[in-house]
Amino acid sequence: MRIIGHVDMDAFFAAVEQRDNPRLRGKPVIIGGHKQSRRGVVSTCSYQARKFGVHSAMPIRQAVELCPQGIFLPGNMAKYRQISRQLYTILAEFTPLFEPVSIDEAYLDLSQCAQNYPSLWDLGLDLKKTIKQKLQLTASVGIASTKSAAKIASDLQKPDGLTVILPDEFDRVIGVLPVSKLHGVGTKTAQRLEKLGIKTILDIRKLGRKAMVATFGKHGDWIYNLSLGLDPRPVVREYTRKSIGRETTFDQDQRDPRILLQTLEELSSDIARRLQSQGLWGENVTLKLRTTDFVTTTRSLSVNRGIADQNEIWETARLLLEREWLNKKPEQRPALRLIGISVSNLTNIRQISLFTDL
């Protein structure tokens, strides 16, 4: 049996700031921008702030409304990346086979390491204890036989949690959870499943593989396998992501330029947060448009240096929208069902233009 761990640092950016500044401990700390930020988005917030309804990817202006007493900080990505490298050094002490997912999250193949412990629980405790001693930060750890189950497990008892799920415990622990907990089941897919009467992960089995494939295609087959506890993905030491993107399907077909530009702003903020959290820059920005008759158009623009800044992504996407849609007469603009942005050709080394101000 494979033994896979998932380590997820608790409220990482906010926890680092609270660790380094005792005056912030126990306070609602919100990372992502100053209180007056117009375009800032929450990247991470402390658990004290979450009690007020603040969460990641939320616009700063909304976070201020929910938690006006919050302490808003722009964050320090250079410091967070340095601590992330220290985390990876710790993980390497347990196993050389670990896969960073983001700056504060990783999968570990613990199959060999587990032989040195009386139980998987003892292994998880030692991993958490080592991280706490060396970083003065807490992590939530999940241990299971698949990536999907390990990731779900690490989220069950946050913060500072430890959950071990053996294969024969899958139905009892994971099967009763909402379908949205499965890897790859987003909001839209979860809503479609709920309309079919599928609420829990075990309910997916009742619908059956054929019905899932007929409804969701190949993705339905993947979801069905996950509901059985089947996930063949191995832990991969070197992982290179080709692109990071996000798109929105409107509840009603959209022709209002203000709403489209505002949506692009929100998408840009989320993509920038994800790029920065992983220490990545991109060289291509792609705009995706889908009309009401399901005609999809993509337009791309290359930049002469790495891009990860929210405003730069938004300005590039706005330029592409202007060329493809805004420049047309209002009566010639097709109504849009979907709009999306992606940043590709990613690298962890920023290419500086000869004309860039240093």
Image (cartoon, rainbow, N blue to C red):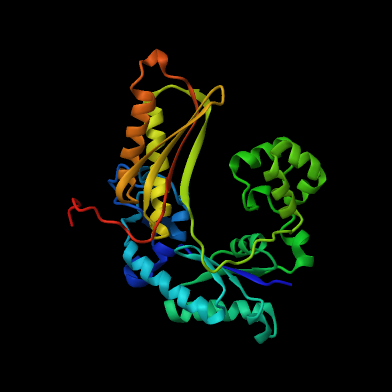
Query: Where 179 sits versus 247, above or below?
Result: below
Q: Nearer the viewer, residue 315 or 168?
A: 315
The residue at the point 55 percent across, 71 percent down is 98
Asked if residue 256 shows in the view, the reply is yes
Displayed quadrant of residue 59: top left
Percent of width and height locating residue 237: 54, 69
Quarter of the image that includes the C terminus: bottom left
Q: Nearer the viewer, residue 237 or 173?
A: 237
The residue at the point 52 percent across, 82 percent down is 93
Query: Where 308 sits versus 322, above or below?
Result: below
Percent of width and height locating residue 286: 42, 40
The residue at the point 54 percent across, 23 percent down is 292
Asked if residue 66 shows in the view, the reply is no
Q: Is residue 340 left or right of residue 155?
A: left
Displayed quadrant of residue 293: top right
Q: Is residue 284 left or right of residue 157?
A: left
Q: Is residue 113 left or right of residue 278?
A: right
Percent of width and height locating residue 106: 53, 66
Q: Nearer the viewer, residue 242 or 136?
A: 242
Image mark count? 0
Quarter of the image that includes the N terminus: bottom right
Percent of width and height locating residue 356: 20, 52
The residue at the point 75 percent across, 41 percent down is 212
Residue at the extreme top of the image, as rendered = 331
Displayed quadrant of residue 82: bottom left
